[in-house]
Amino acid sequence: MLDFGQNEQLAFADPAELVGRTLGEMRFPEKVPVSIAARRHRELSNPGAYSGPWGGGPYFVDHLDRIMDCLGGDSPYREVGVIGPAQTGKSEIGNNWQLHAIIYDPADMLFVMPDRTSIDSYVKTQFDKMIELTPALQDRMLAGASADTINLKRFRGADLFFLWPSGPTFRARPIPRGRLDDYDDIPGDIADQGDAISLLRGRMGAFAAYGQTMIYVNSTPKLGPQAGIEGFVAGGTDERLWVDCLQCGEPFALYGDRLDFDRQGTPRDAALSASVVCPECGGAHGQRDKRALLAGYRWIGKGEQAIARAREPAGKIGELEPNVRAGFRLDGLFGFRPWREIAELGRAAELKFEFEQDDGGLKSWDQTVIGRNFRPRSGNSDPVSESDLQRRARASPYALGEVPPGAEVLIASIDQQGNRFEVSVWGFGHNFKAWLVDRFPLLTVEEDGRERPLRPFTRPEDWGVIHRKVMTRTYPLAGAAHLRMKIFNTVIDTGGLDNATDNAFAWWHAMVAGDVASGRGAIPPTAITLYKGGNNPKGRLLPPPTVDAKRQIKGAPQAEMFIPNVNRMKDILDVRLNRKDDGPGYVSFPHDVPHAYLAELRAETKQGELWVRPQHTANETMDLYVMAYTVVLRFGGSDASLGWVPAWARPPRGGPERLAPRAAAAARRVPAAGHEAPPETSPGVRIGRQATPGQGGRIGVKNG
């Protein structure tokens, strides 16, 4: 017979222990500041970095205590905002507040991050780990699977919701406490209901009368000085961290402008020379001085003034202005990243901007390393106007249809319209200098011995004009008209109405397949670039190409589409156009270029992160440059030497190294005998002359 224990003596719970535990649950929690709770309970586990008790590692975190304590239940503030870069403790402040709320001050809390992926990742990699490492949190967690999900964690007296911005997130959910992470990445208008902070406040009405509401907002700045997190912080106490110089004893604000490094050498030189300089005495502080500097920190807000601790032990005088919002500015200099690394990253970003005119690295450095909104480094107080470009063109030594010295590769770019192709040919040289070589429209196509208007959107057969009248062209060198240069690559915009995109892909397949009837051989896929402008201003400059499976042909080469970040591309062009002296990225124009084409380069204005074209204003030349530069990035990336250009596509030897002022104006564009077909003309536009197909050669391969 099985023994189920029916013969064992019944065991009863210890009454004293049971009553003690029950009464203990009724006891009010101990009143402890958030910073003390973090040091008492928080354990960090970061393989490869510091692991151990909060505040016990090599990083100085005492300056975060005031921010954390402003989130406590007895705080005079109802909102706390923190602006700062990555790796400075913004999120850890919120984590420690959540820990404190569960253990010492239970209440429901809503945590919102910009998207579902972010919040799910946070819960799995950070919050669950904090529970695992904190016995006090485990003891307070309710039993049952429903109490421990990705989006809801239930503790005794506190439900924590982890969600993303949407209408339902802020609907029918009374919440006394809220946390918004990466605020500048959260949409400003959620489901046509308003911004996240206003929606959070709207869910707190029932608790506001008792003074028990709190909102914590933090973010890396991205939206400008009057918007987003910086505007939120500036509307509060707006406190900055001050320290005393270790040499003269005078106080200064420890922020990115105080970091000094070699701005003439390499990123490595910058790292080796990095130091924080006192604005009073010029004293330099190295990385080994960082902890000693921070030991004398104090937060200085509105109404307060920093003073040397030698004269005033508190290190400040005055009284902080009353406010319901506490605001703090963190900076990379008192974050976890070494100063040498900050300097190295900064110099690398400066060099990228200097040689490529791409401010993406500087923007990232300002926002995520230093912790401030991006400061444009255009170098010119006044942007170059259309009139300035006209004066630049008039002083140019070469003419339309000529290749000036310095151009190492020619790229044709084509924008399709309903009744024409707009064409440009650009020359690119070392350090991404550029020259407009040709600019014209293709308006007609020959059919049955007569010219008729083009219809690129609706008639795929019209696309054959591109090969005959663009891709086979060769251009004479300025000052050496007997030497000619071939086009390396032709880029075509695939966007448009009707069947524009289908026609572009069909033309691409026809080009790479060849045409037996006409005797035209197959053209290498590297000779053509299919282009579409990307509309995400935060995307990569040039992502990997995409493949549209619906527009592929079985057994044929794969047609790839290149979709650059057009807004960043136009940022780069704007910097290059604004450069008034010759140098990396400088853009030159022929002296006889029609003014209308120069006006198209200045047609758009930047509004926020987007470039906007006024209605009924032509901007084709601007778009055509962006398309041509996309080809440069496709083949060479950041290679400013243009080492990727094949020998056959480079200018032939024997051309002039430089031109005397306006010398090219007198140089007749007379090609070698027998090497020219009659030029196509259009009203009011001068067109570069074209070579016969026999002299143009195959694009993408060297002629035999």
Image (cartoon, rainbow, N blue to C red):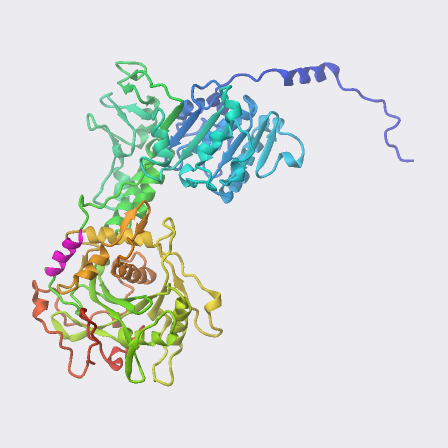
Q: Residue at x 37, y 36 (%)?
A: 228
Figure quadrant of residue 519:
bottom left
Q: How many marks?
A: 0
Let me know if residue 458 is in the magenta part. no
Residue 387 versus residue 79 in the image, above or below: below
Task: State the quadrant of the N terminus.
Answer: top right
Task: State the quadrant of the C terminus.
Answer: bottom left
Residue 220 versus residue 448 in the image, above or below: above
Figure quadrant of residue 407:
bottom left
Figure quadrant of residue 310:
top left
Residue 421 versus residue 309 in the image, above or below: below
Of 138 and 420, the residue lying toward us: 420
Give the x, y percent position of residue 501. Answer: 40, 66
Q: Residue at x 52, y 32 (%)?
A: 110
Query: Which residue range is magenta in the image?
Result: 385-394
- Can you see residue 329? no
